[in-house]
Amino acid sequence: MRKTLVSVILIAGVLSLGCGTVFAQKAPAAKAEKERVRKSVEVFQDLLNLPEKGIPPALLKKAQAIAIIPGLLKAAYVVGGEHGRGVIAVRLDNGGWSHPAFISMTGGSLGFQIGVEKSDIILVFKDKASVATIAGGKFTLGGGASVAAGPVGRSAQASTDVNFEAEVYSYSKAKGAFAGISINGASLQMDMDANERFYGKSGLTVDDILSQNLSAPPEARELVNLLDKSTK
């Protein structure tokens, strides 16, 4: 009996340590996702504060999805690569915006290059079908949809691509200003672990998030409100 009791205590102790470890791993991660959304809000707010150097309002009004990747890291030593994590939101049938879903972005390049650089990336999608592709696996920019370096400023639409014919427009913010950037070949995919941590629900699907069928943390609502205000 004594041995059995000791064994039970030992097992309970191991389980409690294991639970503590899991909690320690999940708590900082959930905090990291919230910070990622806050950074995305900051990046998009910076965009709105630069009307003459940002994304043309006419393009924002046509947007069917918007992805924000704050602090994309580009590193190179002859062979280059880039990686970042961010969020994507989709325009709803009522004209509003979905809660954000978490995504990752990776890409590569080849050539003589040395250095490390961070920049904020915004992708403006004119077609929701691209988001469905991301949800189903990987979406390669320039692969299944045409991607163009986005025009900048209120007057840009008067001089270039008046009808915004590309399916995705890409922007980069570095040194305080936004500029169109070519990122063909980079791939996007859903970060399902991050989605589960942020919304606190296991087995969460992309449809659950984009259809608004769950409660969202304040950070998510802040981003949605910002998108609502800026894309009407």
Image (cartoon, rainbow, N blue to C red):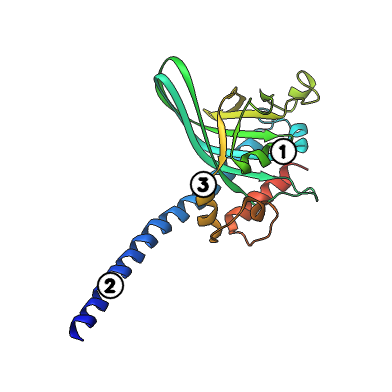
Q: Residue furthest bottom?
A: 1
Q: Are marks 2 and 1 in contact (CB under 8 Å)?
A: no
Side (left or right) of 192 relative to 135: left
Q: Mark number for residue 183?
A: none
The residue that label 1 is drawn on is 129
At mark 3, the secondary structure is: helix
How far apart are the alpha carbons under marks 1 and 3? 25 Å
Q: Name the image quarter holding residue 133.
A: top right
Mark sitting earlier along the chain (1/3): 3
- Pointer 1 local density, CA inside 10 Å: few below 14, some 14–19, many at least 20: some
- Residue beneath disc 3: 36
Q: What amino acid does circle 2 point to? A: Ile
Check disc 3 and give the amino acid type: Arg
Residue 1 position (above or below residue 204): below
Q: Which residue occupies the extreme left position in the image?
A: 2
Q: Which of marks 2 and 3 precedes in the sequence?
A: 2
Instruction: Read off the residue under disc 2.
Output: 11
Task: State which quadrant residue 49 falls in.
Answer: top right
